[in-house]
Image (spheres, grey):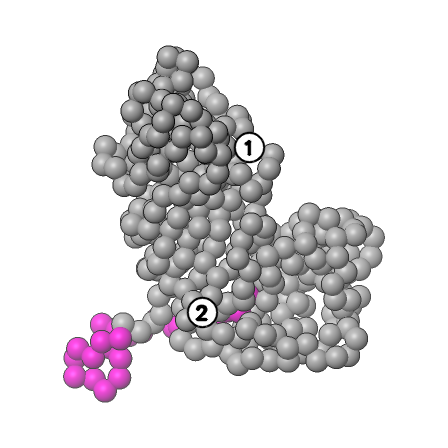
Amino acid sequence: MKETIATAIFVIPAMLGLAGCSAPTTAETTDFSGEPREQTGRAKQALSVCVDVQRGLPGSTVEDTCLDASAPSYSDGAAIAFYTGLGNGSERRSLLKFDLGFIPAGSVIDSATLKLYQVWRTGGESTVRVHKVTAPWSEATATWASAAGSYDAAVVATILARNELTSVVTADLTAVVQGWSDAGDNHGVALEEDLVLNTEFRSSDEPIAARRPMLSVCYTAPTCEDGIQNQGESGVDCGGPCAACPPVGVMITEPGEAYGHHGSCDGWNGCGDAATCALWACEINGYSQLVSHGAGAPCTELDNCHLFFSQNAIEWSWGTFCGVSGVTDIVCSN
């Protein structure tokens, strides 16, 4: 069974369990009107968790920049576009990096797709080559002189930059992300192409969120079982004592959904802080424990907020009318 999760807009909404040895059962809770509110799909065990990483989505950190051989000391990390190929007579390469620290150690990467918004171009098709970057860099400081050569020569993926196209193009980075997850050496990717044409992509500074670079990752987190009977035992052998199973978590918030507290339109008010609001949200949805939660954001920046009057009283679907803080990406368990 595969369930998908995303952290905000431009994603596929679904409910999921993060990982573990078992899953809680589907529960019913009572909403503010007193009617049963079934947590449909929220108690399913999800073997594969899917996350979209894109600047502007809660919890996402993305960096990108363009390196220009004609300006070897210039840092271009704040531009709304980056380029590959030959532009204005100069070679250009670009770097992208997505923070994937949320993926548990030992996970299997089921898929990882890089999505870029290619700007209209003329002159024919071109193949943009993708390489693994081999050294740390920052979009605020990276220049041609400091970073243009810091990538592995091996091509790990390609992107077909098409003539007369303004749309999203993709590259399969499943093997690359698996390597990053295993080795912990994620420095991102470098893009380059033959010095004949010039390809333009929108960067993470693009005002229209849907045009920003995105990495869509699906992964299966490890459990405490290796599934092998290899020492004559009747149960599962882990090659030694099994570590405790990680908490089974259920994501109770959809993309853009958050929990906050009624009151003045700023701060956490009666909740006190994001963790308290997240715990209250778990409890009012029928769970006893808070596993994790995402960042807080004003409800005006979200799709919908549910606001607590007190720990056990809530107004569902308040909307986006107020700048009161709401907490997203709430994972609960029993």
Dominant secondary structure, magenta: loop
Residue 303 in picture, x, y percent from top left: 68, 54
Amino acid marked by disc 2: Ala
Toward which corner of the image does residue 122 lie, by quadrant? top left
Task: Check if residue 270 falls in the magenta segment.
Answer: no
Instruction: Note whether residue 110 is visible.
Output: yes
Residue 21 in picture, x, y percent from top left: 40, 75
Where disc 2 sits, the SS reads loop
Quadrant in which the C terminus is drawn: bottom right
Amino acid marked by disc 1: Asp
Instruction: Note whether residue 272 is visible.
Output: no
Residue at the (20%, 84%) spot, across then down: 233
Residue at the (41%, 27%) spot, across then down: 199
First of labels 2, 1 by sequence position: 2
- Mark 1 lies on residue: 205
Structural crowding at the residue carrying mark 2, measured as other residues with C-alpha within 10 Å and reported as few (<14), some (14–19) or many (≥20): many
Tell me how many marks there are: 2
On the picture, is 29 further left or further right than 54? right
Using the image as rendered, state which of residue 243 and residue 164 is in the foreground: 164
As drawn, the label of residue 46 is 2
Residue 41 in picture, x, y percent from top left: 55, 73
Magenta segment boundaries in residue numbering: 227-251
As drawn, the label of residue 296 is none
Structural crowding at the residue carrying mark 1, measured as other residues with C-alpha within 10 Å and reported as few (<14), some (14–19) or many (≥20): many
